[in-house]
Image (cartoon, helix red, strand yellow):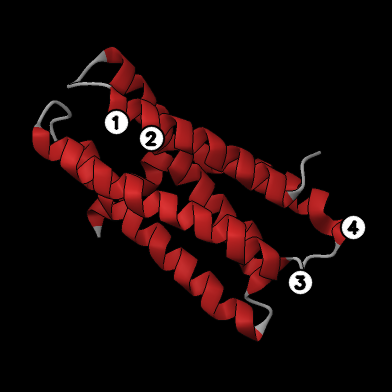
Amino acid sequence: MPSIYDAIKKDHDRHRELLDIIVETEGASDDRKSAWDELYRDIKSHSAAEEETFYSKLLTQTWGQDAARHSVHEHAEMDEILEELREMDMSSSGWLTRFKTLKHDYEHHMEEEENEVFGRAKEVIDDGELDGYGDRFLKRKKEEMGLIEEKREDALED
């Protein structure tokens, strides 16, 4: 059973790999499409699961409210870019330019979580709870993976 930190970090490591793969590919190649699809789906499910399991715990502390709100706001901004990219022609230069913005913003977000938020979270999540939070995160992420299209359709209706 991974701790909540290990589960999130493992996702982040894979996301960094995918970001790099996408930047190194060209046009609408099969490699770019495959990496993009995995990244899109994984970030969407990761962010939702993180908010519902990890950040909800941080909200119980006064200092955690600002940290959680900041991260959730960044999730929303990245989600907007993900949706823009999904609608754009992957072979256009504009797509890659916008993707590089996502890459920059998301790398900053992951670094901030790992180097600042995790440290503060250790004040709230007891060592004995780490695996339980990790399990809840992974279970919720799996559930969220199945809700991506439904949530996307709901958002388009708004």
Q: Is residue 3 above or below residue 62?
A: above
**Contact between labelled residues 3 and 2, with CB atoms less than 8 Å apart:** no
Q: Separation of disc 2 and disc 3 at Cα?
A: 31 Å
Q: Residue at x 62, y 82 (%)?
A: 63
Q: Secondary structure at mark 3?
A: loop
**Label disc, if present, on residue 124 of the rendered structure:** 3
**Label disc, if present, on residue 19 of the rendered structure:** 2
> Does the image show residue 153?
no
**Contact between labelled residues 1 and 3, with CB atoms less than 8 Å apart:** no
Nearer the viewer's eye, disc 2 or disc 3?
Answer: 2
User: Counting residues from the N terminus, which is met first, the one under dot 2 or under dot 3?
Assistant: 2
Q: Secondary structure at mark 1?
A: helix
> Does the image show residue 111?
yes
Q: Separation of disc 4 and disc 2 at Cα?
A: 34 Å
Q: Residue at x 50, y 52 (%)?
A: 110
- Residue type at mark 4 is Gly
**Label disc, if present, on residue 23 of the rendered structure:** 1
User: Counting residues from the N terminus, which is met first, the one under dot 3 or under dot 1?
Assistant: 1
User: Counting residues from the N terminus, which is met first, the one under dot 1 or under dot 4?
Assistant: 1
Query: Label 2 crowding class (10 Å Cα cut-off): few <14, some 14-19, many 20+?
Result: many
